[in-house]
């Protein structure tokens, strides 16, 4: 097939695809009204279609340039333009591959706990042809690296277990680990506290509670258990020997928890919730509350991006082509 006909065919296919997208999602949305276009198979088709269209146009340009080169000689600037557009083709192709075969999700893992991948991953989005690799992931230890009174780094020691074999990786902020094609990135962290709540005749709670980390730097969350109802737990990393706790302290030098029952009216919590240092017991109405242990939890972003090599190579070619186009345009 001649390159001119190939370009016309690519143009016709792209016009048909765009008309189908407009009809399916915007003119007559129907059942697709609640579906996002960027997560649809049509988005993948559009990326591959754009790549094919650019490739066809590039082949047409190369054919013309080869004929002109025999008469006027080669033109480096025009070659740079071809290289630039070839880079765009690879970038679009890479995004299409990732949309078709990639995945992303999130998982929260407390210290000393292991989860099954992918069955215990939440908020999972996968490409149409993605196939999972199953293994177990455990957070062995998480540490806060001090820089004065601030956090210099969050360092996690993560165990990846498959077929009975364990391999440890160290994950830090902006330094993900890659295992079997999946990137594991640290996204958020917080504290878990082990509370034992008892009445006179029974144990109401004996478990770890994962406390949410809020944007204002505070750690608190609400929970509900039978026989006790709804209550709020707030974690303080540094409880002074005297005076009020340091609300926004980060490092758990003298940890304590504040726990209070929540009333049914709109005013929220009942006043006078006890603040209980680590290893001690306090009273909450008719209940005794023991704060016996604390640990970290960490939230990871998990993703697979099989098209990244094409995107990386395409970016290099695009920059190189643009450089040749600008430098040798005279």
Image (spheres, grey):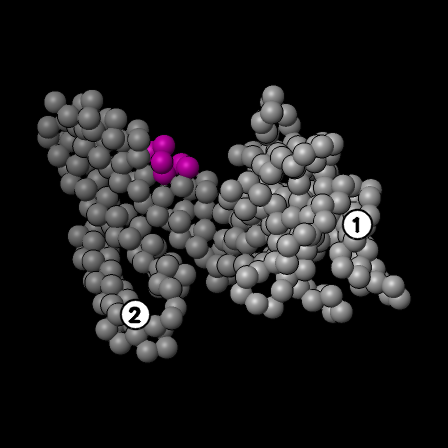
Q: Can residue 206 be seen in this view?
A: no
Real-space CA distance between mark 1 and mark 2, rounded to the nearest whole angstrom = 59 Å
Residue 251 magenta-highlighted: no
Q: What stretch is highlighted in magenta?
A: 312-317
- Residue 279 x %, y %: 82, 42
Whether residue 85 sits left or right of residue 216 in the image: it is left
- Report which residue position mark 1 lands on: 282
Point out which mark residue 25 bears: 2
Residue farthest along the bottom direction in this orientation: 30
Q: Is mark 1 on a helix, strand or loop?
A: strand
Q: Residue 277 at x, y = what percent?
A: 76, 41
Q: In which quarter of the image is residue 63?
A: top left
Of residue 80 and residue 165, the one placed in the foreground of this image is 165
Q: Which mark, by number, is residue 254?
A: none
Residue lying at 45% horizontally and 57% vertically, measured from the top left = 100
Ranked by sequence position, the earlier of labels 1 and 2 is 2
In the image, 266 versus 50, the foreground residue is 266
Of tags 1 and 2, which is closer to the observer? Answer: 1
**Residue contact at pointers 1 and 2, CB within 8 angstroms:** no
Badge 2, how many Cα within 10 Å: few under 14, some, many 20+? some
| SS of the residue under disc 2 | helix
> Residue 155's x, y, as percent?
64, 33
Q: Quadrant of residue 86?
A: top left
């Amino acid at each position: 097939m001649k390159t001119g006909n190939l370009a016309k065919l690519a143009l016709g296919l792209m016009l048909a695809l765009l008309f189908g997208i407009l009809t399916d999602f915007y003119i007559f949305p129907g059942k697709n009204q609640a579906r996002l276009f960027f997560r649809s198979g049509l988005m993948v088709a559009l990326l591959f279609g754009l790549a094919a269209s650019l490739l066809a146009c590039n082949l047409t340009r190369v054919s013309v340039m080869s004929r002109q080169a025999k008469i006027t000689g080669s033109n480096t600037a025009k070659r740079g333009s071809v290289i630039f557009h070839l880079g765009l083709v690879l970038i679009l192709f890479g995004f299409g591959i990732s949309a078709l075969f990639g995945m992303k999700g999130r998982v929260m893992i407390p210290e000393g706990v292991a989860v099954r991948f992918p069955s215990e991953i939440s908020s999972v989005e996968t490409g149409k042809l993605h196939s999972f690799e199953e293994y177990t992931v455990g957070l062995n230890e998480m540490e806060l690296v001090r820089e004065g009174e601030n956090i210099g780094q969050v360092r996690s020691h993560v165990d990846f277990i498959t077929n009975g074999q364990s391999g440890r990786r160290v994950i830090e902020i902006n330094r993900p680990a890659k295992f079997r094609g999946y990137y594991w990135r640290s996204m958020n962290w917080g504290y878990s506290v082990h509370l034992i709540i008892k009445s006179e005749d029974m144990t109401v709670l004996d478990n770890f509670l994962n406390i949410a980390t809020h944007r204002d730097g505070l750690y608190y969350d609400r929970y509900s258990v039978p026989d006790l109802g709804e209550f709020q737990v707030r974690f303080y990393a540094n409880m002074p020997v005297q005076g009020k706790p340091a609300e926004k302290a980060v490092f758990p030098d003298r940890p304590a928890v504040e726990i209070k029952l929540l009333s049914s009216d709109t005013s929220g919590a009942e006043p006078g919730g006890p603040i209980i240092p680590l290893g001690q017991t306090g009273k909450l109405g008719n209940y005794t509350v023991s704060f016996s242990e604390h640990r970290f939890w960490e939230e990871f972003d998990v993703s697979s991006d099989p098209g990244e090599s094409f995107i990386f190579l395409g970016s290099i070619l695009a920059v190189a082509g643009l450089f040749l186009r600008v430098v040798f345009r005279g």
